[in-house]
Amino acid sequence: MFTIGTLAKKTGTKVQTIRYYEQIGLLPEPGRSAGGQRRYGDSELDRLSFVRHARQLGFSLDAIRELLDLSDHPEKSCAEADAIARRQLKQVEQRMVRLEALRTELQRMVHECSGGHTADCRVLEVLRDHSECLTDHDEIGA
Amino acid sequence: MFTIGTLAKKTGTKVQTIRYYEQIGLLPEPGRSAGGQRRYGDSELDRLSFVRHARQLGFSLDAIRELLDLSDHPEKSCAEADAIARRQLKQVEQRMVRLEALRTELQRMVHECSGGHTADCRVLEVLRDHSECLTDHDEIGA
DNA sequence: TTTACACCCTCTAGCTACTGTAGGTTCAAG
DNA sequence: CTTGAACCTACAGTAGCTAGAGGGTGTAAA
């Protein structure tokens, strides 16, 4: 049995984040000490590690909720978990394509900057004149 | 002179977003009709286009504020705008490196999925066992 | 002129995934 | 028994919008 601070350290999570996960129902309510402080065991540690790992892979909290649910029911089909992972992979690949295009345009801006006054700044010029933009940005915010 | 809806269409922005930009001081308060509706001209159109293009390149609203300020003062040095763009480029490159690693791990998860029951699901297994993780994810949320 | 209807207005709340703060309590060591 | 770190709840704030309620405006046709 350990405290929330210990669990935080073991998983590389902030204490508030753990309480937040509990609040939104991602982690179960743990036992408490006589004085009302949270006490955790290894099962909570495992569950939180799972959550953190999935977050690091970019899964949304909703996706993680689904994955946890699947993990709790070993008799269910694997197909759903697979679908979630594939969806995530697709998203990552799409983001990479977008970032690739952004990088190209930013490189162009930066490389062509003459270093004079802003009146002649290539960076600002490119931003001002959208027609020079080679890429299709349908979405915003990589 | 055109309405906010027209400006929205011309720039591919939502009406609410335009009002939001005005609220946070990114766009100046425009003139109004007798009845109190916003009326825009070409200068506002240019400014909003600039903002949108910069957003599409992933610049934060704060960075855009700086860029707009530089754009408004043609006598200032280009160096600052250049620095902002370089910072942005660096961020994009870092994100790409991270996404590359995530993609590899997700591909590994998905490719090794046998398609049986969740008890044997490779996806869940990988998430459960963090020690199999080859990459260093210091940050969360691509 | 009236009426219909799309569009506009302000204000407020909600979204994701946390993070930070205030003001107070508990725990373990010395 | 006292000290100080760590804990508690509750609420506010972050970025960058987005959605809704409840009402007013503008224009074109009947």
Image (cartoon, coloured by chain):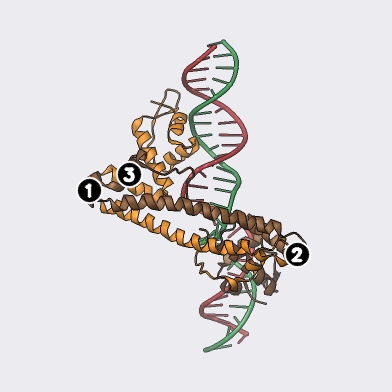
Chain colours: A orange, B brown, C red, D green
Let me know if residue B37 appears in the view.
no
Q: Nearer the viewer, residue D13 or A139?
A: A139
Q: Position of residue B108 (x, y in %)?
A: 33, 50
Q: Nearer the viewer, residue B66 or A14?
A: B66
Q: Provide the residue designation for mark 2.
A: B74
Asked if badges 1 and 2 are on one and the same chain, I answer yes
Chain of the residue under the numbered disc 2 shown in the image: B
Chain of the residue under the numbered disc 3 shown in the image: B
Q: Could you tell me how far apart the alpha carbons at marks 1 and 3 are, in whole angstroms?
A: 15 Å
- Which circle marks residue B117 in the picture? 1
In the shown orientation, is residue A31 left or right of residue B18? Answer: left
- Which circle marks residue A78 in the picture? none
Q: Amino acid at mark 3?
A: Val
Other-residue count near label 2 (Cα within 10 Å), few / some / many at <14 / 14–19 / ≥20: some
Q: Amino acid at mark 1?
A: His
Examine the rendered structure and indicate whether residue B72 appears above or below residue A49: below
Element under label 2?
Answer: loop
